[in-house]
Image: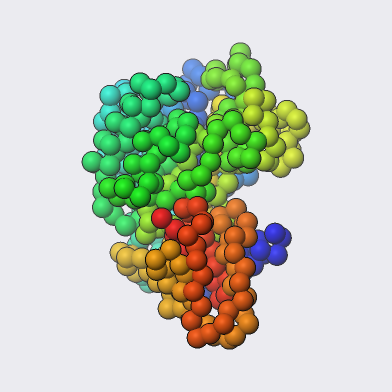
Protein backbone atom coordinates (compact mmCIF):
# COMPACT_ATOMS: atom_id res chain seq x y z
CA UNK A 1 0.00 0.00 0.00
CA UNK A 2 2.86 2.40 0.87
CA UNK A 3 4.47 1.67 -2.51
CA UNK A 4 1.18 2.45 -4.25
CA UNK A 5 0.74 5.74 -2.42
CA UNK A 6 4.33 6.72 -3.27
CA UNK A 7 3.81 5.80 -6.91
CA UNK A 8 0.61 7.84 -7.11
CA UNK A 9 2.34 10.78 -5.47
CA UNK A 10 5.17 10.56 -7.99
CA UNK A 11 2.61 10.43 -10.80
CA UNK A 12 0.99 13.63 -9.58
CA UNK A 13 4.39 15.31 -9.29
CA UNK A 14 5.21 14.25 -12.85
CA UNK A 15 1.92 15.67 -14.15
CA UNK A 16 2.55 18.97 -12.41
CA UNK A 17 6.11 19.17 -13.70
CA UNK A 18 5.26 18.20 -17.29
CA UNK A 19 2.10 20.23 -17.73
CA UNK A 20 2.38 22.94 -15.06
CA UNK A 21 -0.74 21.53 -13.42
CA UNK A 22 -2.05 22.47 -10.03
CA UNK A 23 -3.43 20.02 -7.52
CA UNK A 24 -6.27 21.70 -5.66
CA UNK A 25 -7.89 20.39 -2.51
CA UNK A 26 -11.66 20.73 -2.18
CA UNK A 27 -13.22 20.24 1.25
CA UNK A 28 -16.80 20.14 2.47
CA UNK A 29 -17.68 20.72 6.12
CA UNK A 30 -20.96 21.10 7.97
CA UNK A 31 -20.17 23.95 10.39
CA UNK A 32 -23.06 23.12 12.74
CA UNK A 33 -25.35 26.14 13.00
CA UNK A 34 -22.42 28.55 13.02
CA UNK A 35 -23.35 32.08 13.97
CA UNK A 36 -21.99 34.80 16.23
CA UNK A 37 -23.93 33.58 19.26
CA UNK A 38 -23.29 29.85 18.61
CA UNK A 39 -19.55 29.98 17.95
CA UNK A 40 -19.29 28.36 21.39
CA UNK A 41 -15.48 28.39 21.54
CA UNK A 42 -15.16 26.31 18.37
CA UNK A 43 -12.89 28.61 16.33
CA UNK A 44 -9.65 27.08 17.75
CA UNK A 45 -10.98 23.62 16.90
CA UNK A 46 -11.82 24.61 13.33
CA UNK A 47 -8.36 26.18 13.03
CA UNK A 48 -6.61 23.00 14.22
CA UNK A 49 -8.65 20.80 11.86
CA UNK A 50 -8.48 22.93 8.73
CA UNK A 51 -4.82 23.83 9.20
CA UNK A 52 -4.14 20.09 9.04
CA UNK A 53 -6.27 19.59 5.91
CA UNK A 54 -5.24 22.87 4.24
CA UNK A 55 -7.95 22.99 1.56
CA UNK A 56 -7.83 25.42 -1.35
CA UNK A 57 -11.63 25.50 -1.51
CA UNK A 58 -13.90 25.06 1.51
CA UNK A 59 -17.67 24.57 1.17
CA UNK A 60 -19.53 25.09 4.45
CA UNK A 61 -23.09 24.14 5.33
CA UNK A 62 -25.19 25.27 8.32
CA UNK A 63 -23.89 28.84 8.07
CA UNK A 64 -26.36 30.83 10.13
CA UNK A 65 -25.13 34.41 9.73
CA UNK A 66 -22.38 36.49 8.09
CA UNK A 67 -19.87 35.96 10.91
CA UNK A 68 -18.44 32.68 9.59
CA UNK A 69 -16.80 34.26 6.53
CA UNK A 70 -14.99 36.97 8.47
CA UNK A 71 -13.92 34.72 11.32
CA UNK A 72 -12.73 31.86 9.13
CA UNK A 73 -10.77 34.20 6.85
CA UNK A 74 -9.21 36.06 9.78
CA UNK A 75 -8.72 33.29 12.35
CA UNK A 76 -9.02 29.82 10.78
CA UNK A 77 -7.68 29.74 7.20
CA UNK A 78 -4.48 31.60 8.00
CA UNK A 79 -1.77 29.79 5.98
CA UNK A 80 -2.53 31.76 2.80
CA UNK A 81 -4.87 34.65 1.91
CA UNK A 82 -8.46 33.42 1.72
CA UNK A 83 -11.69 35.13 0.72
CA UNK A 84 -15.31 34.25 1.42
CA UNK A 85 -18.26 34.52 -0.90
CA UNK A 86 -20.83 37.15 0.09
CA UNK A 87 -23.24 35.76 2.67
CA UNK A 88 -26.82 35.41 1.43
CA UNK A 89 -29.41 34.89 4.13
CA UNK A 90 -31.94 32.42 2.78
CA UNK A 91 -34.51 30.26 4.56
CA UNK A 92 -33.16 28.04 7.36
CA UNK A 93 -29.33 27.79 7.37
CA UNK A 94 -27.13 28.64 4.39
CA UNK A 95 -24.04 27.54 2.47
CA UNK A 96 -20.89 29.55 1.84
CA UNK A 97 -17.61 29.05 -0.02
CA UNK A 98 -14.13 30.14 1.06
CA UNK A 99 -11.23 29.95 -1.39
CA UNK A 100 -7.49 30.59 -1.63
CA UNK A 101 -7.04 33.87 -3.49
CA UNK A 102 -3.69 32.86 -4.97
CA UNK A 103 -5.34 29.96 -6.82
CA UNK A 104 -8.86 31.14 -7.66
CA UNK A 105 -10.90 34.13 -8.73
CA UNK A 106 -14.50 34.36 -7.56
CA UNK A 107 -16.95 34.77 -10.46
CA UNK A 108 -20.23 34.77 -8.57
CA UNK A 109 -23.02 32.75 -7.01
CA UNK A 110 -26.60 31.79 -7.70
CA UNK A 111 -29.28 30.18 -5.56
CA UNK A 112 -31.56 27.27 -6.42
CA UNK A 113 -34.56 27.36 -4.12
CA UNK A 114 -36.19 24.34 -2.50
CA UNK A 115 -39.01 24.05 0.02
CA UNK A 116 -36.56 23.91 2.95
CA UNK A 117 -33.30 25.71 2.17
CA UNK A 118 -31.40 27.03 -0.82
CA UNK A 119 -28.83 25.08 -2.80
CA UNK A 120 -25.93 27.43 -3.56
CA UNK A 121 -24.10 27.50 -6.90
CA UNK A 122 -20.62 29.04 -6.75
CA UNK A 123 -18.44 29.68 -9.80
CA UNK A 124 -14.69 30.17 -9.47
CA UNK A 125 -11.84 30.16 -11.99
CA UNK A 126 -8.24 29.03 -11.65
CA UNK A 127 -5.39 31.52 -11.83
CA UNK A 128 -3.09 29.70 -14.27
CA UNK A 129 0.65 30.35 -14.29
CA UNK A 130 1.39 28.37 -17.45
CA UNK A 131 -0.08 30.59 -20.18
CA UNK A 132 -3.27 28.56 -20.55
CA UNK A 133 -6.77 29.92 -20.17
CA UNK A 134 -8.37 29.61 -16.70
CA UNK A 135 -10.34 26.51 -15.83
CA UNK A 136 -13.84 27.34 -14.60
CA UNK A 137 -15.12 25.26 -11.70
CA UNK A 138 -18.80 25.28 -10.70
CA UNK A 139 -19.56 24.01 -7.20
CA UNK A 140 -22.94 23.23 -5.68
CA UNK A 141 -23.19 23.31 -1.89
CA UNK A 142 -26.14 21.26 -0.66
CA UNK A 143 -27.78 20.52 2.67
CA UNK A 144 -30.68 18.21 2.01
CA UNK A 145 -33.59 17.38 4.30
CA UNK A 146 -32.67 15.29 7.34
CA UNK A 147 -34.37 12.27 8.96
CA UNK A 148 -34.80 8.62 8.09
CA UNK A 149 -38.44 8.41 7.04
CA UNK A 150 -40.33 8.14 3.76
CA UNK A 151 -41.48 11.76 3.79
CA UNK A 152 -37.96 13.12 4.33
CA UNK A 153 -36.52 10.83 1.65
CA UNK A 154 -39.17 12.08 -0.77
CA UNK A 155 -38.29 15.68 0.06
CA UNK A 156 -34.60 14.98 -0.55
CA UNK A 157 -35.51 13.61 -3.96
CA UNK A 158 -37.47 16.76 -4.80
CA UNK A 159 -34.55 18.92 -3.70
CA UNK A 160 -32.18 16.97 -5.95
CA UNK A 161 -34.57 17.33 -8.86
CA UNK A 162 -34.62 21.10 -8.34
CA UNK A 163 -30.82 21.02 -8.40
CA UNK A 164 -30.71 18.99 -11.62
CA UNK A 165 -33.24 21.26 -13.32
CA UNK A 166 -31.29 24.40 -12.40
CA UNK A 167 -27.80 23.07 -12.97
CA UNK A 168 -25.21 24.48 -15.34
CA UNK A 169 -23.82 22.41 -18.20
CA UNK A 170 -20.23 23.42 -17.38
CA UNK A 171 -17.86 20.47 -17.75
CA UNK A 172 -16.06 20.86 -14.44
CA UNK A 173 -18.75 20.65 -11.75
CA UNK A 174 -18.85 19.48 -8.14
CA UNK A 175 -21.77 18.76 -5.80
CA UNK A 176 -20.71 18.69 -2.17
CA UNK A 177 -22.22 18.95 1.26
CA UNK A 178 -24.49 17.27 3.76
CA UNK A 179 -26.84 15.04 1.76
CA UNK A 180 -28.46 13.28 4.75
CA UNK A 181 -28.84 10.19 2.55
CA UNK A 182 -29.27 6.87 4.35
CA UNK A 183 -28.85 4.39 1.51
CA UNK A 184 -27.37 4.18 -2.00
CA UNK A 185 -30.83 3.04 -3.10
CA UNK A 186 -32.39 6.42 -2.24
CA UNK A 187 -33.68 8.27 -5.29
CA UNK A 188 -31.89 11.44 -4.13
CA UNK A 189 -28.66 9.52 -4.63
CA UNK A 190 -29.42 7.44 -7.72
CA UNK A 191 -30.76 10.44 -9.65
CA UNK A 192 -27.29 11.97 -9.34
CA UNK A 193 -24.98 8.95 -9.72
CA UNK A 194 -27.17 6.17 -11.13
CA UNK A 195 -27.14 4.94 -14.75
CA UNK A 196 -30.41 6.76 -15.52
CA UNK A 197 -29.27 10.14 -14.18
CA UNK A 198 -30.11 13.10 -16.43
CA UNK A 199 -26.58 14.36 -15.92
CA UNK A 200 -24.48 11.78 -14.21
CA UNK A 201 -22.04 12.57 -11.42
CA UNK A 202 -19.43 10.25 -9.97
CA UNK A 203 -19.14 9.16 -6.35
CA UNK A 204 -15.38 8.57 -6.04
CA UNK A 205 -15.91 5.84 -3.43
CA UNK A 206 -18.38 3.95 -5.59
CA UNK A 207 -22.07 3.31 -5.09
CA UNK A 208 -21.89 0.14 -3.00
CA UNK A 209 -22.13 0.90 0.73
CA UNK A 210 -24.47 0.67 3.69
CA UNK A 211 -25.00 2.61 6.92
CA UNK A 212 -24.26 1.27 10.43
CA UNK A 213 -22.21 -1.62 9.04
CA UNK A 214 -18.68 -2.46 10.16
CA UNK A 215 -17.49 -3.23 6.61
CA UNK A 216 -18.11 0.39 5.57
CA UNK A 217 -16.99 2.13 8.76
CA UNK A 218 -14.04 3.80 6.99
CA UNK A 219 -16.34 6.04 4.91
CA UNK A 220 -18.72 7.34 7.61
CA UNK A 221 -18.85 11.05 8.42
CA UNK A 222 -21.59 11.46 11.02
CA UNK A 223 -21.99 11.61 14.00
CA UNK A 224 -18.78 12.54 15.86
CA UNK A 225 -20.55 12.39 19.27
CA UNK A 226 -22.03 9.43 21.11
CA UNK A 227 -24.22 11.54 23.40
CA UNK A 228 -25.53 15.08 23.18
CA UNK A 229 -22.96 17.71 24.18
CA UNK A 230 -24.17 20.66 26.22
CA UNK A 231 -21.71 22.99 24.51
CA UNK A 232 -19.81 22.76 21.22
CA UNK A 233 -22.55 24.21 19.05
CA UNK A 234 -25.34 21.85 20.03
CA UNK A 235 -25.96 19.27 17.33
CA UNK A 236 -27.03 15.64 17.53
CA UNK A 237 -25.66 12.41 18.96
CA UNK A 238 -25.60 8.80 17.79
CA UNK A 239 -22.00 7.88 16.98
CA UNK A 240 -20.10 7.39 13.71
CA UNK A 241 -22.52 5.25 11.71
CA UNK A 242 -23.72 7.28 8.70
CA UNK A 243 -22.30 8.56 5.44
CA UNK A 244 -24.02 11.93 5.05
CA UNK A 245 -21.23 14.08 3.58
CA UNK A 246 -20.12 13.65 -0.03
CA UNK A 247 -18.10 15.23 -2.80
CA UNK A 248 -19.56 14.17 -6.16
CA UNK A 249 -17.85 15.23 -9.39
CA UNK A 250 -18.93 15.49 -13.01
CA UNK A 251 -17.84 12.68 -15.31
CA UNK A 252 -15.54 15.14 -17.10
CA UNK A 253 -13.81 16.01 -13.83
CA UNK A 254 -13.68 12.52 -12.31
CA UNK A 255 -10.54 11.31 -14.12
CA UNK A 256 -8.70 14.29 -12.63
CA UNK A 257 -9.11 13.07 -9.06
CA UNK A 258 -5.81 12.14 -7.44
CA UNK A 259 -6.11 8.45 -6.66
CA UNK A 260 -6.47 7.73 -2.95
CA UNK A 261 -7.04 11.37 -2.00
CA UNK A 262 -10.75 11.17 -1.09
CA UNK A 263 -10.71 11.38 2.71
CA UNK A 264 -13.26 11.61 5.52
CA UNK A 265 -10.82 13.41 7.81
CA UNK A 266 -10.41 11.79 11.22
CA UNK A 267 -12.08 8.50 10.26
CA UNK A 268 -9.58 5.75 11.09
CA UNK A 269 -11.75 2.89 9.84
CA UNK A 270 -12.53 1.55 13.31
CA UNK A 271 -16.11 0.26 13.45
CA UNK A 272 -17.33 2.59 16.18
CA UNK A 273 -20.86 2.70 14.79
CA UNK A 274 -22.73 4.07 17.82
CA UNK A 275 -19.61 5.41 19.57
CA UNK A 276 -17.88 8.78 19.35
CA UNK A 277 -14.88 9.55 17.12
CA UNK A 278 -12.56 9.23 20.14
CA UNK A 279 -14.02 6.03 21.62
CA UNK A 280 -11.96 3.88 21.38
CA UNK A 281 -8.95 6.21 21.00
CA UNK A 282 -8.58 7.33 17.39
CA UNK A 283 -5.78 5.59 15.49
CA UNK A 284 -5.39 8.16 12.72
CA UNK A 285 -5.33 11.51 14.50
CA UNK A 286 -4.09 12.66 17.88
CA UNK A 287 -6.30 12.80 20.96
CA UNK A 288 -6.32 16.61 20.69
CA UNK A 289 -7.41 16.45 17.04
CA UNK A 290 -10.13 13.89 17.81
CA UNK A 291 -11.41 16.17 20.59
CA UNK A 292 -11.41 19.10 18.14
CA UNK A 293 -13.37 17.09 15.57
CA UNK A 294 -15.86 16.05 18.23
CA UNK A 295 -16.48 19.61 19.43
CA UNK A 296 -16.28 21.58 16.17
CA UNK A 297 -19.19 19.78 14.51
CA UNK A 298 -21.28 16.65 14.61
CA UNK A 299 -19.95 15.92 11.08
CA UNK A 300 -16.45 15.11 9.85
CA UNK A 301 -14.96 17.18 7.02
CA UNK A 302 -14.39 15.41 3.70
CA UNK A 303 -11.79 16.41 1.11
CA UNK A 304 -10.45 15.34 -2.27
CA UNK A 305 -7.55 16.45 -4.48
CA UNK A 306 -8.14 17.30 -8.15
CA UNK A 307 -5.63 18.15 -10.87
CA UNK A 308 -6.42 21.29 -12.87
CA UNK A 309 -4.56 23.62 -15.18
CA UNK A 310 -2.70 21.22 -17.48
CA UNK A 311 -5.10 21.52 -20.45
CA UNK A 312 -6.98 24.31 -22.13
CA UNK A 313 -10.27 24.97 -20.38
CA UNK A 314 -13.29 23.30 -21.95
CA UNK A 315 -11.49 20.31 -23.47
CA UNK A 316 -14.11 17.59 -22.99
CA UNK A 317 -12.88 14.34 -21.48
CA UNK A 318 -9.25 15.08 -22.22
CA UNK A 319 -8.05 13.76 -18.87
CA UNK A 320 -8.77 10.14 -19.70
CA UNK A 321 -8.33 10.16 -23.47
CA UNK A 322 -4.95 8.46 -23.34
CA UNK A 323 -4.01 6.70 -26.54
CA UNK A 324 -3.23 3.32 -24.99
CA UNK A 325 -6.33 2.81 -22.81
CA UNK A 326 -9.98 2.47 -23.89
CA UNK A 327 -13.12 1.52 -21.96
CA UNK A 328 -15.44 -0.42 -24.26
CA UNK A 329 -18.37 -2.73 -23.41
CA UNK A 330 -17.45 -3.24 -19.73
CA UNK A 331 -13.85 -4.03 -20.62
CA UNK A 332 -10.54 -2.20 -20.75
CA UNK A 333 -8.60 -2.44 -23.98
CA UNK A 334 -4.91 -1.76 -23.46
CA UNK A 335 -2.33 -1.33 -26.20
CA UNK A 336 0.61 -3.50 -25.17
CA UNK A 337 4.07 -1.93 -25.34
CA UNK A 338 5.91 -4.95 -24.04
CA UNK A 339 4.70 -8.52 -23.55
CA UNK A 340 4.57 -9.74 -19.96
CA UNK A 341 4.11 -6.25 -18.52
CA UNK A 342 1.77 -6.32 -15.53
CA UNK A 343 -1.44 -4.26 -15.49
CA UNK A 344 -3.08 -3.44 -12.16
CA UNK A 345 -6.34 -1.64 -11.39
CA UNK A 346 -6.83 0.24 -8.11
CA UNK A 347 -9.82 2.04 -6.63
CA UNK A 348 -9.79 5.43 -4.92
CA UNK A 349 -8.86 3.87 -1.58
CA UNK A 350 -5.79 2.17 -3.00
CA UNK A 351 -7.31 -1.33 -3.07
CA UNK A 352 -6.14 -3.68 -5.82
CA UNK A 353 -9.03 -4.97 -7.95
CA UNK A 354 -7.24 -6.60 -10.87
CA UNK A 355 -3.75 -7.90 -11.62
CA UNK A 356 -3.01 -9.29 -15.10
CA UNK A 357 -0.08 -10.03 -17.38
CA UNK A 358 -0.28 -8.27 -20.75
CA UNK A 359 0.06 -10.23 -23.96
CA UNK A 360 0.12 -8.08 -27.10
CA UNK A 361 -0.64 -6.39 -29.30
CA UNK A 362 -3.90 -5.54 -27.48
CA UNK A 363 -5.07 -6.89 -24.14
CA UNK A 364 -8.71 -6.93 -23.05
CA UNK A 365 -9.61 -7.02 -19.34
CA UNK A 366 -13.18 -7.31 -18.13
CA UNK A 367 -14.29 -4.75 -15.54
CA UNK A 368 -17.92 -5.89 -15.48
CA UNK A 369 -17.70 -6.95 -11.83
CA UNK A 370 -16.23 -3.72 -10.48
CA UNK A 371 -18.42 -1.24 -8.57
CA UNK A 372 -19.03 2.15 -10.18
CA UNK A 373 -16.36 4.72 -9.39
CA UNK A 374 -12.99 6.13 -10.40
CA UNK A 375 -10.06 3.76 -10.91
CA UNK A 376 -6.35 4.08 -11.54
CA UNK A 377 -4.58 1.81 -14.04
CA UNK A 378 -0.90 0.92 -14.02
CA UNK A 379 0.46 -0.91 -17.07
CA UNK A 380 4.19 -1.37 -16.80
CA UNK A 381 5.46 2.18 -16.31
CA UNK A 382 2.32 3.85 -17.67
CA UNK A 383 -0.46 5.35 -15.55
CA UNK A 384 -4.00 6.50 -16.36
CA UNK A 385 -7.46 6.64 -14.81
CA UNK A 386 -10.97 5.82 -15.94
CA UNK A 387 -14.52 6.23 -14.69
CA UNK A 388 -16.74 3.17 -14.46
CA UNK A 389 -20.43 4.11 -14.71
- Identified at 62% across, 57% down, the residue is 350
**For the N terminus, which image quadrant?**
bottom right
- Identified at 63% across, 17% down, the residue is 227
Relative placement, left or right, of 268 versus 221 is: right
Looking at the picture, tell me which residue is in the foreground, 187 or 142: 187
**For the C terminus, which image quadrant?**
bottom left
Height in image: 215 above or below 115?
below
Residue 86 seen in the figure:
no
Residue 120 seen in the figure:
yes
Give the tally of numbered discs.
0
Height in image: 128 above or below 296?
below
Looking at the picture, tell me which residue is in the foreground, 369 or 158: 369
Residue 35: x %, y % from top left: 46, 23
Give the quarter of the image for residue 110: top left
Residue 167: x %, y % from top left: 26, 44
Relative placement, left or right, of 263 versus 314 is: right
- Identified at 33% across, 26% down, the residue is 155
Instruction: Report the colour scheme.
Output: rainbow
Residue 140: x %, y % from top left: 36, 42
Residue 92: x %, y % from top left: 36, 21
Looking at the picture, tell me which residue is in the foreground, 325 or 171: 325
Residue placed furthest toward the top:
230
- Identified at 34% across, 41% down, the residue is 191
Relative placement, left or right, of 231 versus 247 is: right
Amino acid sequence: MKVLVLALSLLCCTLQTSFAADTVRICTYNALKFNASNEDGRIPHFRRILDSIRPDVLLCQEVDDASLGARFVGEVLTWTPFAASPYINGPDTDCQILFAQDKFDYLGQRRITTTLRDIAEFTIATRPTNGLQPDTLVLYAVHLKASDDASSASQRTQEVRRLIAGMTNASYAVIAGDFNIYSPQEAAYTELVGPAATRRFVDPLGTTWARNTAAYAQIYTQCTRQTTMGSCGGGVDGGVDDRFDYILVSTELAPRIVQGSYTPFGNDGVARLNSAIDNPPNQRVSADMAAALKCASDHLPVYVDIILGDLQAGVEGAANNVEWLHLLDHALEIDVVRDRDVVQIYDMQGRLWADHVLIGPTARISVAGLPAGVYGVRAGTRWASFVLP
